[in-house]
Amino acid sequence: MSEDFKAKEIQLVVFKIGKEDFGVPINQVREIVRLVPITPVPRAPQFIEGVVNLRGQILAVIDLAKRLNLTPAPRSDKTRIIVVEVEDNTVGMIVDEVTEVLRLSTESIDSTPELITTEVHQKYLKGVGKLGERLLILIELAEVLSHEEVEEVRKTKGEEQKEGHKKEE
């Protein structure tokens, strides 16, 4: 478990995918931006939406719902891109809505049920936070992609930069 989840209280960015609430430690989030037009990249894995130019930096953008095998809500003006660092790569992750930033006592966090962790084998599931009647699935965004998938993201970003240079010539 990361250091974030060992403190007495953690500050979380809470977002929705479909009907589910997720929480990630705030220090994993570099920024949250509105959904901007995404340029598709040929031959990219299906969960990679494409790339965007964010203030001069090319970012690969991942559809987090597809990556987690969840059904997203239709894209709307609430849809956001959460920008995170994954293995020295800046990556955007599309979520349906960022709802709040909150503090949660670690006493309110239960470990992920064993059936889920053994069946799904997901190292990014860090626990379940209890907020009254609400349950918050706690994840490590940096762990959502395997090392191989991070390489795919790196290639996707590289392909777009090569294409951009060809267009400029």
Image (spheres, grey):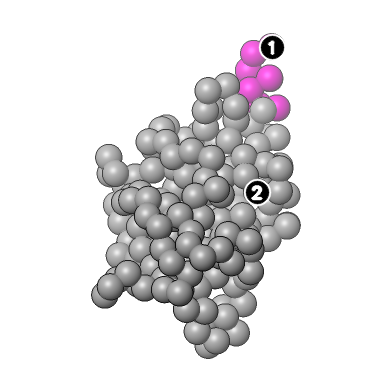
Q: In screen coordinates, is 72 left or right of 124?
A: left
Residue under label 2, please give it: 86
In which quadrant will I find the C terminus? Answer: top right
Q: Amino acid at mark 2?
A: Val
Q: Amino acid at mark 1?
A: Glu
In which quadrant will I find the N terminus? Answer: bottom right
Outermost bottom residue: 115
Label 2 vs label 1: CA separation? 31 Å
Seen from the viewer's position, the closer of residues 20 and 40 is 20
The mark found on residue 169 in the picture is 1
Q: Image height check: is 117 above or below 39?
A: below
Mark yes or no: residue 40 visible: no
Q: Image height check: is 42 above or below 163?
A: below
Q: Image height check: is 10 above or below 56?
A: below
**Pointer 2: residues within 10 angstroms few (<14), some, or many (20+)?**
some
Q: In screen coordinates, is 98 left or right of 30?
A: left
Q: Residue at x 62, y 77 (%)?
A: 121
**Which quarter of the picture shows residue 124?**
bottom right
The stretch of residues the image draws in magenta is 162-169
Q: In screen coordinates, is 94 left or right of 149?
A: left
Label 2 or label 1, whichever comes before in sequence order: 2
What percent of the width, then of the height, locates residue 83? 52, 41
In the structure shown, which secondary structural element does the residue marked by tag 1 occupy? loop
Question: Looking at the magenta stretch, what is its main secondary structure?
Answer: helix
Q: Residue at x 60, y 72 (%)?
A: 122
Outermost front residue: 8
Q: Nearer the viewer, mark 2 or mark 1?
A: 2
In the structure shown, which secondary structural element does the residue marked by tag 2 occupy? strand
Q: In screen coordinates, is 159 left or right of 109?
A: right
Q: Residue at x 68, y 51 (%)?
A: 150
